[in-house]
Amino acid sequence: MMTLNKQINFSFFRKRLGVGVLLLACSLMLLSSCNSWIEESPSGQVTDTQIGDSEEAVNTWLTGTYSKWIYDMFCWGYFPRVLEFDADYISGPDWLFGTFGAGNFQGESDVTDALWKGCYGLIARANNAERHIAAMVNPSDEVKYNAIGELKFQKAFAYFLLVRAYGEIPIQPEEANGEKNQPRQPIPTVYAYIIEQLEEAVALMYKNTDPGYKAGHVCAGSAAGLLVKVYATMAASAMPAGTQVTIRSGQAYEGAGSDKAYAQLQTFTFSKRSVNGYADMDAATLYARAAAWAEKLEEGYYGAYTLLPYNQLWKRASATASEFLFSVGTVSGDATYKTAVHTQYEGYKTAPGSDFIQSGGWVGCTRHWYDLFDHDDYRITEGVKHRWRYYTQQESNSGFYYPYDEEYTYMATGRDADGNYSGSPSGIFADGVNYYYSMDAQCLAFTTKYMDVSNDAIEEADANWPFLRYADVLLLYAEALNEIGQPEKALIYLNKVRERSNATTASLSDLDTQLKRRSAIIEERAKELACEADRRWDLIRWGVYLDAMNALGGSDDSGVAKTRQERNLLFPIPAQEINTNSAINANNPGWN
């Protein structure tokens, strides 16, 4: 199931369209192992006569394209890992993060099969679907144009993921018989193509308030929101080297053995490093364009969008709400169209509604991330797990608590800061269970964002992955306004997000310089968008990725290696692409 404000139910389409959808999905995934992954395979393609020429046929082509996000990209667990695990505030067990999480991207399936192959497979599928839909004569122009707009959005988003990760990349021919051996294009050329696709998509697609808008389809506001993110990414990357950014971080621990303790947050002011490929872009112009698109979206030009109350934001019933401009989900219990989101972030239970996690619940945020928040911010009071239990703890009647501080230690154990027993466990801990803390990957700031699913005792749970939220756009709007000299207005949109979470509002007297406002907005993004695969890319575009990662002093809370070097700024082009694409003869710097 694909969601963007509304959801496509793949099981519904399979029942209604019979073998058409499955035939389409299978045929368009057939890319020969001896070919470049940017090629479209001409053999086995579904034809017009097989799918037909009707509005139903349009939906079949669209569903086949949307399904690519799940099958081959999310279903094996590589997504969102490939976008998420290489960041300063995210952590988990070393066996899960592996060599990729430690910064060795060479030959990793995340980088090859999931991101490069997955995105180019989606682009190939969208190009093919667009040609077939454009050739139809029976559907109305309105239906055809909207469908083509949806496909253009999918292509643009895939290219956006690719260009951020790999830098210069090939642009796949839109025509069926185009030259297969495509060279890597300069970064400005790739972005020009992305922007072209999105601007066309905005004009072609329904608004989410239009009568013709159908559940599960991308809409005009989605493309406008992505344009904000694209322009802000370009603009920050193009900011001059030496531009300063302040980040709160530092090494995880101090001391050792019985004296081991969490280190206090440190404040670092880093000078931006030049981001290769963006030097000739004008940051002020790009930020002005980001602000213009955000303003139109916020004022309702492309539909109705709003921030949800926090207590509704991560409910399953809200998965189709307007805040979620673009999200990927699945059908509960579907073994093909599945994701690992619920398993990796929450863990699945021994039985529906059980207190015990059977497996999973591995990925979380670090203590330094947790310490960024105000005490009563809903994003940690409600958005972080404070107690959980694994099935292995049932016999011992035990469980974990978080965080390890005076307040929660007293609530969970009844012991004061000196270890003296001075009361009974209270609140959520007053259940007769013996709670304890472990200073390793077992105890992280685990999110509750993906907890509410139809069945929490299966691996194939229906947790949505939020690729683009309205809150993301508002924070980028605030960022753009700050950089183009509108500080008062910037704080309005920063505070919209903060107020929703019961956080202290920011004022000009506190954030009285552009640097302070810039840093506060970047930090707010780290808090609001945690476990949504944005942090690495914010650090990269602001040119402080190497400094932020290396400020951890070598490893994070779980012992995952976080030392980084220049080659980590870009992912390596997969070896198969270099070996089969005659137009590409070199990899990114530092990769064989």
Image (spheres, helix red, strand yellow):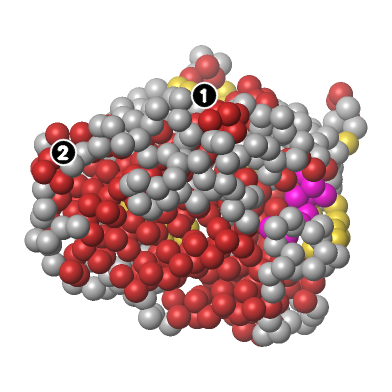
**Dot 1 corresponds to which residue?**
390
| Residue at x-position 56% and y-position 74% | 290
Q: Position of residue 308 (x, y in %)?
A: 42, 65
Picture layout, residue 506 above or below residue 471: below
Quarter holding residue 276: bottom right
Q: Secondary structure at mark 1?
A: strand
Chief secondary structure of the magenta portion: helix
N-term-proximal mark, 2 vs 1: 2
**Dot 2 corresponds to which residue?**
20
Picture layout, residue 264 above or below residue 361: below
Quarter holding residue 83: top right
Amino acid marked by disc 2: Gly
Q: Which residues are magenta?
A: 541-549
In space, the residues marked 2 and 1 are separated at their CA atoms by 43 Å
State whether residue 296 appears in this view: yes
Question: Does 542 lie within the magenta span?
Answer: yes
Q: Nearer the viewer, mark 2 or mark 1?
A: 2
Tell me if 407 is positioned left or right of 290 in this view: right
| Residue at x-position 78% and y-position 71% | 516
Looking at this view, is 80 or 252 the one in front?
A: 80
